[in-house]
Image (tube, rainbow, N blue to C red):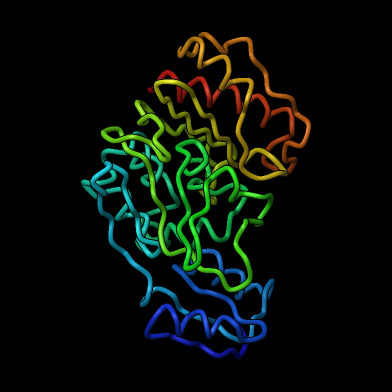
Amino acid sequence: MYDFDYVRPASIEDAIAALAAEDATALGGGQTLIPTLKARLAQPSRLVDLTGVLDTGIRRAESGAVHIGGAARHVMVETSPETASIPGLQGLAAQIGDPQVRNRGTIGGSLANNDPAACYPAAVLALDARIVTDRRVIPADEYFQGLFTTALEEGEVITGVIFPSGSGPAFDGGERVEKGHYAKFLQPASRFAMVGVYVAKFPGAVRVAVTGASERGVFRWAEAEEALAQDFRAEAIADLAHPAEDMISDLHGSPEYRAHLVGVMTRRAVAAC
């Protein structure tokens, strides 16, 4: 490690002011940032700890939508009675890392970091959730913009995430989510997703979000969505293959292997629904 200033603000306003300093970095659960600092892959001069000022609560609105605070830890998402109404989300949270990670990592930190192999981006994109910041509300389709890249502006902080539930309408007067499931093929050492697919079925549409596979980061598989909207069965996409173009290539798998896994995990998610 190396010398840096540690700031624990007393309010969100103080946090925003502290983040305005040159080379300041926000600290959530620290599950990505701390190892990065240890390896000296990043060397910010100031860490601004957000865990004391961000909401950790999980609550349901009258509409049925579920608001998850930005500092809610993965284990809270996994076990809250409120998140049980969001098809597939508790199962996703239960597959993140190990118990130590799930008891420290936060949903806001994961989404702000937007690791290409993280699990939450697939849930947010498939369920058409909303990212709430200290400045605005960002629809899922507008939030993710590539590897470790989001719509967040400099100094902007995620304060919560709003998910539709199985008992209330989706946003903007849309339909509620009927079914959902996250199927994950994990890398055993890191427990990140080599490929993870979240399928969400609404009365009038299906959304399929893929994480861990692409150099573009999390993305929606439009061809599968169209086929499943017509026939929501795994057999309906049995012959559908995702191209290997833009797939990640590393020591764990080739682009062709990951493209194959996209189809396999999508079918498993649909079957589980």
Q: Is residue 40 above or below residue 122?
A: below
Q: Is residue 112 above or below residue 196?
A: below
Q: Is residue 138 above or below residue 273?
A: below
Q: Position of residue 222 (x, y in %)?
A: 62, 25
Quarter the C terminus occupies: top left
Q: Position of residue 25 (x, y in %)?
A: 58, 77
Q: Is residue 114 above or below residue 178?
A: below
- Residue 23 left/right relative to 85: right
Which residue ends up furthest to the left in the rendered image? 81
Total marks placed:
0
Which residue ends up furthest to the front in the rendered image? 173
In depth, the one of 229 and 84 nearer the eye is: 229
Tell me what residue is drawn at x 46 percent, y 69 percent.
28
Tell me what residue is drawn at x 59 percent, y 40 percent.
194
Which residue ends up furthest to the right in the rendered image? 245
Q: Position of residue 204 (x, y in %)?
A: 44, 21
> In which quadrant of the rendered view does residue 176 lie?
top left
Quarter the N terminus occupies: bottom right
In depth, the one of 236 and 117 nearer the eye is: 236
> In which quadrant of the rendered view does residue 251 lie?
top right
- Residue 235 left/right relative to 174: right
Q: Position of residue 184 (x, y in %)?
A: 49, 35
Tell me what residue is drawn at x 53 percent, y 24 percent.
266
In depth, the one of 12 and 73 nearer the eye is: 12
